[in-house]
Amino acid sequence: MTVSIREATPADVPAIAAIYATEVRDHVNTYEYDIPDEAEMARRMRAIVEGGYPYVVAECDGEIAGYAYASSYRARIGYRHTVENSVYVAAGQQGRGIGTALLEKLIARCEARGFRQMIVVIGEPANTASIRLHEKAGFHLVGIFRGIAWKHGRWLDTVQMQRPLGAGNQEPPNDR
């Protein structure tokens, strides 16, 4: 199995939309209820890329096996050096190092763009694979919000983890 990580393109949207549809329909890794169509996923990708954030895909034997992107953590200007990451691996592809490869590339791209902190919001503490993936990449637990989301007939807790990028908060940014 050969995995390559590259910039996502509009041609990848159908595969990305299919991966995300499974997450929306079957899991609680996103608290979205309605499956976005390809046009909406393309719009989201465009907004992320045009906002100056990285969006990458994992290609495995000619097929998209996962995707990851960073986006604004919060809209207010003071948060401009902090990003939130999202990593999704296609059903049946987990446990093959794809998530690790995606996250490593995403971290490197964010550091190259001068971002200083990365946050991940994980849909429930039972998602140990995502928690382990992020711990392995240097994230630490910030906290757990209890019962803040409702999906699939139950209240869900949400895990928040954080990792410094580059100099982190050890020195001021270039644009203060």
Image: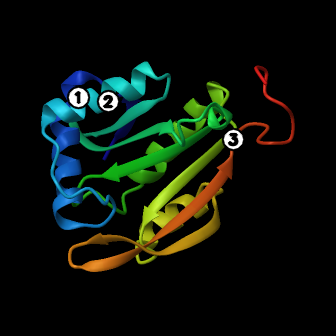
Q: Residue at x 19, y 41 (%)?
A: 17
Marks 3 and 2, the one that precedes in the sequence: 2
Which amino acid lies under the numbered mark 3 shown in the image of this protein? Leu
Check disc 1 and report the residue beneath it: 42
The residue under label 3 is 165
User: Is residue 170 visible in this depiction of the protein?
Assistant: yes
Work out how far the residue at label 2 is from the one at label 1, CA to CA, in angstroms.
5 Å
Residue at the farthest front position: 76
- Position of 81 relative to 96 (above/below): above
Q: Establish if 117 lies above or below 148.
A: above
- Vertical placement of 152 versus 53: above or below? below
Q: Answer yes or no: is residue 62 visible.
A: no
Q: Residues within 10 Å of mark 2 (few under 14, many from 20)?
A: many
Please count the marks in the image: 3
Say whether disc 3 or disc 1 marks the residue closer to the N-terminus.
Answer: 1
Instruction: Tell me what residue is drawn at x 19 percent, y 24 percent.
Output: 11
Circle 1: is it few (<14), some (14-19), or many (20+) Cα within 10 Å? Answer: many
User: In the visual, does 43 lie left or right of 157?
Assistant: left
What's the residue at 64%, 38% (across, down)?
79
Report the quarter where the C terminus lies.
Answer: top right
User: Callout 3: helix, strand or loop?
Assistant: loop
Q: Badges 2 and 1: C-beta atoms under 8 Å apart?
A: yes
Q: Amino acid at mark 2?
A: Met
Q: CA distance from mark 3 to mark 2?
A: 23 Å
Residue 122 point in image, percent of width and height? 45, 62
